[in-house]
Each structure stands twice: as C-alpha cells, then as structure tokens.
Amino acid sequence: MTATLAAVPLIFDPAASRGPTTTTAWAEAARAVFAPAANLRRFRVGDEAAVELARPAWSWLAPYRLPGVDELGEPQDFRYRSLDALRELVEQVVAARMPIRLGRMPADSPTIELLRTAVGGRGRVVVRPAATYPVIELDDSWRAPIDKLNSGRRSDYRRAVKKAREVGEPRTEILTPQANQLDELLESALEIEARSWKGEAGTALRHDARRAEFYRRYCRSACEEHSLRIAFLYYGDVSVATQIAVELDGGFWLLKVGYDATYSRCSPGNMLMAATIEYAAAAGLRTYEFLGMSDAWTRVWTERERESVVVRVIPYNAGGALATLGDACGAARRRIEPRKQLSQLVKYAKSTVSRPLHGLMHKAARNYIAGESVGEALQAARRLQVRHELPCTLGYWDADGEAPDAVLARYVEAVEAAAITECDTYLSIKYPSLGYSTERLRKVLQTAAKRSLRTHFDALTPDSVDRTRDAVEKFQAEYPALRFTLPGRWRRSPADADWVVERRLPVRIVKGQFPDVDEPAGFDRRRGFLDVVERLAGRAAHVSVATHDAALAEAALRKLLAAGTPCDLEVLYGLAWRKPVAAARRLGVPARIYIPYGAAYLPYCLKEARRSPRMMLRALADSLRG
C-alpha cells in the first residue's frame, strides 16, 4: 500500500468534499472527449472560478450543459475557490441569457441559490431531484470495516474468504501509479472489468471507446497530481477484482469497480471494498465516496446518501422558448413509445386505483395456490393423482413478515399430514423463511426423516444461496434425502451445478423468478436454463426439469436422457400443464405437480407485466378467473 499524497481541488470550503468531478482535469477530459465539435461557451473569474458549457452545434433546441454529465452520469458543479468568485462566475453565466441544464448537481451546492438570485425576474430556475449517491463518513472504527456489517453479512464474508482460499490466499494491492506504469495498470483494470457482468452486457469500458478515452485522459492528469489510486485483489496470483479511484480533498472517490464473475461466489468485489475502506480510514481520510448511484451492493456498506438535483435555467427570451420547445418534443416522443406508455399506465393504475388493483391481483393469485391449509393442498394432490396419475410436491408459501417459528410449525404440520395420506409427495421449504436457523431446519429434517419424506430447498434470491448451501453441507450426511434448486438465470448457477454434482444432490432446474444482482438487459432465460441442463447432463444424480414451456421442457429432457441422467418434469399448480406433461410422457419421463398453499402469490409480477402487454392481459384474465 502507498502513503496518502495531498492534492488541492478548486473548492471554497476546506471541510466539504467536492471531489474529482469538480476539478479542471475532469472538465478538460470531458470537453475533449464528449464535446470536441460542440458550441462551447467558457466563463472564468481569473484563476478563482471557471465553467465550460456546451450544446451540439447542430441543435438550436438543446440547452447548454456541462460536458460529459449525461454520458458519465456523475454529479458535477462549477469550479471555484471562493464563494465570492463563484458568485461572480454565476453572474457571468446568467448574463449570457442561455438556456442551461445542469444534470446531477450536488443538492447542497451554493451554485443553485446563486443562480436563483442572479436570474431574478429575467427567467426561471427549476430544480428537480435526481438519483442519490452513497457515502461513508469515516472514523477510526472503519479501520475494521467487517465489524460494521450485520451478523448475517459478517458470516457471509467469512464464508467468502474461506472459499477464496480454496483458489489462493487473498491479497490486496493499492497503488499510486507512476506515469510509466499507468497504461499497463489501466489495461489490467479494464480487463478485469470486462470479465464481469458488464462485459456480457456490453457496458464495460472496453466496449465503450468514448468513455474509456475519457477515463484514460482523466487518469493521466490524476496520476500527474499523485491522487490516482488503482487497487487489485488477488487470489494467489490470479487478479479477481479492481478499483480505480482518486484520493482527493479528504476523500477516497471510487470511479470504476469490477470483478471477475468466475469468482463471484467468493465475493471479490466486497472483499476489495473492505480493503480499500480500511485503507481510507487508516490514511485519516474523512469520507469514502461511491459516486454513481445508490444500489443494493452499496447499501451493504452504508445507508448514508448524498442528494443530487437537476437544475434548469430558462431565460425569458427566444433561446429559453426554443429549449422549452425541445423539452416538449422530447416528452412527446417518449410518450408515444409503447413500452413507456405501458409503464406510465401501470404507474398511474398503481397510484390511483391501488386498492382495487390489489384486490384483483389477489383474486388472480388464488388461481396458483390450492388453498390456505395443508388439508386443501392434499385434497388437490389426491384429485391430481386419481384423475391424472400425477404425484405432487407440497410447498407452503409464507406471507410477508410471517415469523420463522410460525413457518416452522406449518412445515412440521405438512410433514405430519402428508405422512398419513396415500399421496406420492415430498416437501419443498424455503430456508430464509426459517430465519436461516439451523435449529429450526433440524426440526423440519428430523420430522421428515421420521416420516420418510424427502425435503427440497426452493430457490429464492441470489444472496440466499450460500447460506442454503452451507445448510445442505451441514445436514446432508445426517439427512441424505435432501434436494436443491438451481435457477437458470443466475451467473453463479453453472458453478453451483458443479457443487450439486459433487454432493450427489437431486436437483430441480427453474428459470428463476428473481433476477441476478446485475442481470444484463435482454438476458435469454431459456438459454440460461439449457446451459444449466447441459452442465448437469451425464453428471447429476437426478434432475427435475421445472418449466411450463413445452418446447423447452422437451429439449431439456432429451439432453438429459441422451446423457443417461435420471430425470422428470415438475410443473406448477394453476398453470397450464397438459402440454409439457404430454411432452414428458411421450419421452417416457414421469411428471409431478408442485402444489403451493398458504399466501397467494402470482407466478409473475407487475414489473414483468409492464414489459409485456401479453402478460398484463394474462394478469387481468387471471383476476377474472379468480
């Protein structure tokens, strides 16, 4: 690790953290890359304050903007050393009578109030909220960042370190590059980023020449000022994660992060994050700034967020009128896009008729459960077995907020009830619903073992998998009749398939209701499903193909049969099952119905319905049928 090196930003308040996006180096790199041929206006107050505003040379309707703010999405501001210099700079800008749009400006920036004062009655200043960005306020306690996590996440972190050591001992480098090292280090960092989900989605810098050029230019300037930091995490000699950051104005500012998705189950991103947080705290820095936008992965470390806003300056002149006309044209164009239109329709429906809509969706959801009690579920199971010779799986669906002890009681009740029926069935459980308690799980498994009933772990969200796997490893030797579920849509599933094979676990493959943390847009869930099937074919102890897509079910079953893998089909109660069951029976493969009971849930959600008019119609039809 390297020592902290000072850098002096253009800023009037030494206690504030404005960061790299308000430096001259950032502005010059953005102008050179994103506005090389734009209509550019420069404003300056000696060496005390400056700003450049640009708009496309061909557009009379566009407002002037800070170069790069839309392309990079980072909060930017005018550059200034003192409040008096900023006031004079703002007066120069307003005197030019230009329409201006300042995207993602820090909400506490003095620029906003100075703009209001300078504009006065000669125009309007419109301020709208924008995405927040997270920050950690550092103190000495952050020298041990893992201690800041809750107990569950600390356990997750320790497990990740243990898994990483199976690859190689984790070690971290936090470098202050010299000029002759920069290009090689940057290329190494970009290569790691391209091995993450961003590479698959085409959003990595290696796939975006303009943004890559911007970061190269800015990093050269930061390198000259000795503020640039490039961090790497290694497992043994293998580089698995990276960060590009700057140490500036008492803060550690993250610019880019990336990790090799091959090692995602070892949490390399979080492991490197912990190392750089510890480094920043030990260096005596005041803040750890994530930039970007607040997201689930940042909330692992902090709930504190900085507010940002979009500021519009609309002068009362022809330029302001043209910019307003341009905004209206853009809004009209967005309104006529069908997907946007449907999204707005759903948003309106949710906000204005939420109670009737909730009632309709509840009625629709009743089509997908056998009832609220295990007795009703077993009645449905008997009907299916007698009429269609279909065995079943029992799955209790708990309500949001239901106590883990109450869920335990329902699981035990299901085992006891199933044991005295003549139905061919087994029990599906959700480990998170038991509060990840090994004692509660042991009670379920003991009861099921006494009644010779198989127990299956359902799949939920990606962050529940490691703890579910740990539970399987803990109890499999004692209770060998355990089964596992793999969703096809998670990047980790092929590696989990190898684990299933190693443990000789019967497995159910589903498309997956819950997306991966960073699932790329347009991800092909059918392809992901078949990829997992191919990974298991010829290797797994037994595979249950769980899909209502008859063509997909047949393709998956044929692959498994060709490889000599024991298999069957499993379909969800309430959905059309006859075609996939017929396809399975043509191949001589048995079929089974998963029967949920308890809380009514839909097998799709409004988020998916917004993307698909056909699915929205299906929800409406189900509500009428319900």
Image: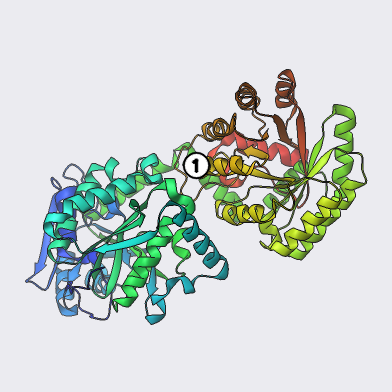
Q: Judge by depth and name the residue closer to the eye, 491 or 467.
A: 467
Q: Residue 258: image x %, image y %? A: 35, 52
Name the residue at the top extreme. 586
Residue at image coords 60%, 49%: 349
Give the residue type at disc 1.
Gln
Q: Is residue 129 visible?
A: no
Image-based side of 170 in relation to 48, left or right: right
In the rendered image, the quadrant that contains the N terminus is bottom left
Residue at image coords 66%, 25%: 550
Image-based side of 100 in relation to 556, left or right: left
Colouring method of the image = rainbow
In the rendered image, the quadrant that contains the C terminus is top right
Q: Judge by depth and name the residue closer to the eye, 380 or 244.
A: 244
Residue at image coords 60%, 46%: 606
Q: Is residue 14 visible?
A: yes
Q: Quadrant of residue 613?
A: top right
Q: Residue 460: image x %, image y %? A: 62, 50
Q: How many circles with numbers are drawn on the protein? A: 1
Image-based side of 412 in relation to 147, left or right: right
Q: Is residue 112 above or below residue 594?
A: below
Q: Residue 110: image x %, image y %? A: 27, 74
Q: For mark 1, does the 10 Å Cα neighbourhood hold few (<14), some (14 to 19), or many (20 or more) residues? A: some
